[in-house]
Image (cartoon, rainbow, N blue to C red):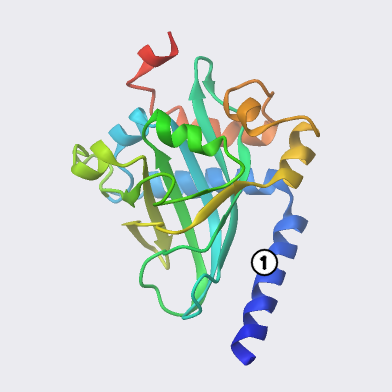
Amino acid sequence: MKYGASLMMMLTTAMWCGAADGPEKHIRESAGVLSEIMNAKDNGIPEDLLQKAYCVGVVPNLKRAGFIVGAKYGKGVVTCRNSNGWSAPEVVRIEGGSIGLQIGAGETDVVFIVMNERGMEKLMKDKFTLGADASVMAGPVGRSAEAETDAAMHADILAYSRSRGIFAGISLEGATLRPDNEENRALYGSNATAQEILHGSVKPPAAADQLYAELNRYPSKNTARYK
């Protein structure tokens, strides 16, 4: 009973704080996390993966509750490439799943890269499960490393985490990802769908400028798909 009550209190607090922060804060924090990770000396995401990415998602401060299975919750943003650059950021929620072997309550920054059209199509759904509806693997680490590994070649989504200064590839197996409809309505109005946001039909907010500035450091290597 004590663990159950603690779990409910932690998740309720996390959800309340996320709502109070507002969607613009999620966008700005996501930009900051991506910038810090990519500016880490020789220990970031391989640049060629970002150049090949269809979409990039960042979930700052994913909450977790130690030994309690499934006690993970976070909000972040995802944006996808289109013929004009990057789409408006969609606010998403991630819940449950495996984030590695970190012990104890705390927070983890999560970054995931969608590597193909199949993975991008899953983002248009109301909800999908990583590992079941789309394959997800721990991504290779090293900013300038050659990333032509089996993971990079065959996974729909590659995932990373940063916790207590340690950056590594992780598997988000079993985590669910869904749009945060309330915060997306606050940003874009009641009629904006995930498809419209991620396909570039919605005007992005000014808060996304820093995120775009970071992503534009890694121009696409696959522009033929937009023609």
Query: Looking at the image, which residue sits at the far top?
Result: 227
- Report the front residue among 86 and 176: 176
Disc 1 target residue: 14
Left or right, 4 with respect to 131, comes to right
Residue at x-position 33% and y-position 44%: 45
Looking at the image, how many numbered discs can be counted on the residues?
A: 1
Residue 69 appears in the figure: yes
Left or right, 225 with respect to 10, comes to left
Q: Residues within 10 Å of mark 1 (few under 14, many from 20)?
A: many
* Residue 156: quarter of image: top left
Callout 1 amino acid: Ala
Residue at x-position 35% and y-position 50%: 40
From the top left corner, tell me how far across and down residue 32 is, in percent: 53, 47
From the top left corner, tell me how far across and down residue 103 is, in percent: 41, 78
From the top left corner, tell me how far across and down residue 154 is, in percent: 26, 39
From the top left corner, tell me how far across and down residue 151 is, in percent: 25, 44
